[in-house]
Image (tube, coloured by chain):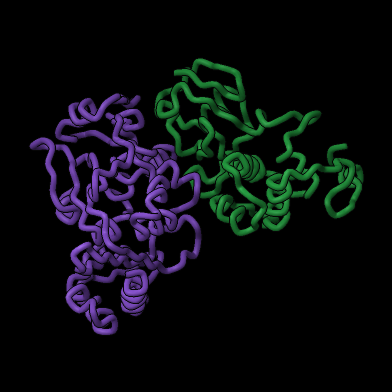
Chain colours: A green, B purple
């Protein structure tokens, strides 16, 4: 089996029923997808498979043989963040961060399919993603800002706090 | 022991490899079976993975709609302009990602959010297993689905349809209780519920009184058995079913 993960093609040695999540994390060392509930209910393992957001924990790797997979690592780098990453940072939309990878991949897919900044539509798109810090308002704000195509000042948060004071990205 | 994994590349190959179904675990979208394996509750010896079996897709020929078993639940939303109830029912299942992955066949044969809706549409089911391929009313298939592999479901486009459901306490809960109403091209009304005991159920007593929503609502409870489960008590469902029947009939009347 083969997978192209974030543009890099790999031959997969894991068994055909191994979940895509385990293949990404354990075989390929791509650790942004998180093992949360591992039954599809929390959203933390969400990745984009051939353009569609999918729960990697529910996906036997054989079912996506030959597919192209994008994770947070493929969105951008700390030096060159993708708009959705800038939006999450600027809006301070991550607290503990465990749900953030899945949230960002679902949000990226939502924007890619033409999603707007309508809060209700964003809530529907992120409906399967659980944030146990309950920071939903800032997450929805961040996705809305990215959907609008806002540009972000990465030296301050949306609330006006200097990033350096928060120990964040400068 | 590692599982034998079979990945058929055509419907005919899927039928052949499934055979009589003995000892075979079917994986469609994976949303039900994969967590069972991940948590070590299921160690299948022989797995039929349907991803590439060519069983996905919605086809319309005249007024006849056929839905392949591995069509995603989310794809049913495309039918919104033709079968409003089925689109609404699909939209109510889980979330965007799980809907995109879960299959119609897996849902119908498993927890069954779609059962009531497709029963109200009087769908027929084509399946394979011991004795070969057979086509039968969905109601009969659901009653005897053990050891069968669903291939597709077919129904006639209705003149109107409506779907009402109890709101979920959480995105991922299965349907607590829902009622679908269908007005046929000939003017008949069919009603069916999801969330009652066992498989979804036609509400035939209520159908016979469909012109009088209050009478139909009162009669509906006689068509089903109510059970307690983690989502709701039997008492709660019994109190709520008449409300949903009345609402669905009123919606049907408005959309006609």
Decide if residue A47 is on the left or right side of residue A135.
left
In the rendered view, tell whether residue B117 sits above or below residue B215.
Answer: above
Name the foreground residue: B116 vs A95: B116
Which residue in the rendered view is the most extreme toward the front? B62
**Residue A13 spot, x, y in % from top left:** 47, 17
Name the foreground residue: A77 vs B46: A77
**Residue A46 spot, x, y in % from top left:** 56, 39
In the rendered view, tell whether residue A165 sits above or below residue A52.
Answer: below
**Residue A49 spot, x, y in % from top left:** 52, 32
Residue at figure coordinates x 50%, y 15% from the top left:
A11
Decide if residue A127 is on the left or right side of residue B216.
right
Quarter of the figure that contains the N terminus of chain A = top left
Residue at figure coordinates x 68%, y 53% from the top left:
A140
Quarter of the figure that contains the C terminus of chain A = top right
- Visible residue check, residue B170: yes
In the rendered view, tell whether residue B100 sits above or below residue B51.
Answer: below
Quarter occupied by residue A111: top right
């Amino acid at each position: 089996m083969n997978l192209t993960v974030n543009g890099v093609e790999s031959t997969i040695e894991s068994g055909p029923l191994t979940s895509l999540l385990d293949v990404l994390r354990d075989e390929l060392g791509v650790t942004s997808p998180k093992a949360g509930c591992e039954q599809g209910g929390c959203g933390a393992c969400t990745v984009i498979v051939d353009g569609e957001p999918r729960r990697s924990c529910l996906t036997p790797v054989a079912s996506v043989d030959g597919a192209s997979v994008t994770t947070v690592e493929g969105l951008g780098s700390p030096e060159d963040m993708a708009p959705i990453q800038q939006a999450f940072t600027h809006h301070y939309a991550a607290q503990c961060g465990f749900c953030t990878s899945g949230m960002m991949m679902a949000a990226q897919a939502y924007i890619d399919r033409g999603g707007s900044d309508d809060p209700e539509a964003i809530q529907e798109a992120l409906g399967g993603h659980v944030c146990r810090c309950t920071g939903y308002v800032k997450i929805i704000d961040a996705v809305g800002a990215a959907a609008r195509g806002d540009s972000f000042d990465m030296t301050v948060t949306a609330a006006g706090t200097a990033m350096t004071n928060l120990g964040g990205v400068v | 022991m590692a599982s034998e994994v079979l990945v058929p590349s055509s419907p005919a190959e899927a039928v052949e490899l499934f055979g009589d179904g003995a000892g075979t675990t079917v994986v469609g979208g994976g949303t039900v079976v994969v967590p069972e394996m991940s948590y070590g509750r299921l160690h299948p010896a022989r797995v039929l993975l349907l991803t590439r079996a060519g069983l996905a897709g919605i086809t319309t020929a005249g007024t006849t709609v056929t839905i392949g078993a591995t069509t995603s639940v989310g794809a049913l939303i495309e039918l919104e302009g033709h079968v409003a109830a089925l689109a609404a029912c699909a939209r109510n299942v889980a979330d965007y990602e799980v809907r995109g992955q879960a299959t119609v066949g897996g849902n119908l044969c498993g927890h069954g959010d779609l059962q009531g809706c497709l029963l109200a549409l009087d769908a027929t089911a084509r399946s394979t297993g011991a004795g070969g391929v057979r086509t039968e009313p969905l109601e009969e298939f659901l009653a005897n689905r053990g050891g069968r592999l669903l291939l597709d479901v077919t129904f006639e486009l209705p003149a109107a349809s409506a779907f009402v459901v109890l709101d979920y306490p959480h995105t991922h809960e299965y349907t607590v209780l829902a009622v679908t109403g269908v007005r046929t091209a000939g003017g008949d009304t069919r009603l069916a519920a999801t969330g009652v005991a066992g498989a979804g159920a036609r509400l035939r007593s209520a159908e016979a009184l469909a012109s009088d929503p209050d009478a139909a609502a009162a009669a509906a409870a006689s068509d089903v058995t109510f059970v307690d489960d983690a989502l709701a008590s039997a008492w709660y469902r019994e109190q709520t079913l008449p409300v949903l029947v009345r609402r669905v009939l009123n919606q049907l009347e408005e959309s006609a």
